[in-house]
């Protein structure tokens, strides 16, 4: 029987994609969601390679986190003009500002991406209770805490953490 699931890279900690936003640039540090369509990229045979434009990403800061936050796949390593190539991390430990402080963000609390802001920061996922929507937006966990908007925290990001 032929092998079906072909490994591309063992760690998958960084990837290359394309800025799918046709009007706005990506800034290094932006939290990115997968914005590509469901159109078939590779057909029925596993390719030997992929082009950077096969993975389309856009920053959540220009989107609605409730919709696109569940599709987060990385954090931009560099700036990228509209439609250009961008490298991004799929996991790591980051310093990010707290954007929404309706509830103090304590060390160990789950974090998600902020929406509707020009700053690519994080928020606490849920307040006193976590809803199903909060679980979908979970990107990682706070390693330090804070209670003032704009203050930085240290947090662990893992694109697969909400699965």
Image (cartoon, helix red, strand yellow):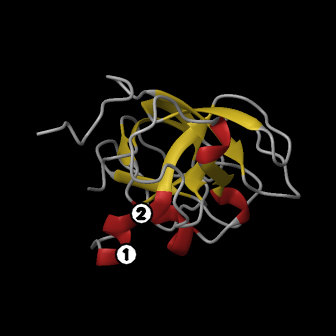
Horizontally, is 20 left or right of 109 in the view? right
Residue at 48% over, 47% down: 73
How packed is label 1: few (under 14 Cα within 10 Å), some, or many (20 or more)? some
Residue at 51% over, 68% down: 102
Placement of 157 over or under 68, stated as above or below: above
Which quarter of the rendered picture does the N terminus lie within? top left
Nearer to us in this view, 33 or 41: 41
Residue 119 visible to an observer of this rendering? yes
Secondary structure under tag 2 reads helix
Image coords of residue 135 (percent x, y): 31, 66
Horizontally, is 30 left or right of 125 in the view? right
Image coords of residue 117 (percent x, y): 73, 61
Residue corresponding to mark 1: 133
Residue corresponding to mark 2: 137
Residue at 64% over, 36% down: 52
Residue 28 visible to an observer of this rendering? no
Which quarter of the rendered picture does the C terminus lie within? bottom left
Image coords of residue 150 (percent x, y): 66, 47
């Amino acid at each position: 029987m032929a092998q079906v699931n072909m490994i591309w890279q063992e760690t998958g900690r960084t990837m290359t994609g394309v800025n799918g936003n046709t009007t706005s640039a990506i800034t290094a540090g932006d939290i990115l969601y997968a914005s590509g369509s469901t159109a078939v990229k590779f057909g029925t045979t596993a390719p030997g390679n992929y082009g950077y434009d096969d993975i389309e990403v856009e920053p959540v800061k220009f989107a609605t986190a409730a919709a696109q936050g569940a599709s987060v796949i990385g954090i931009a390593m560099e700036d990228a003009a509209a439609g250009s190539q961008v490298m991004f991390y799929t996991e790591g430990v980051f310093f990010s500002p707290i954007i929404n402080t309706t509830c103090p963000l304590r060390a160990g609390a789950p974090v998600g991406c902020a929406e509707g802001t020009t700053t690519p920061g994080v928020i606490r996922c849920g307040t006193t209770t976590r809803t199903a929507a909060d679980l979908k937006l979970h990107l990682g966990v706070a390693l330090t805490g804070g209670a003032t908007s704009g203050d930085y925290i240290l947090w662990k990001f893992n694109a697969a953490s909400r699965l």
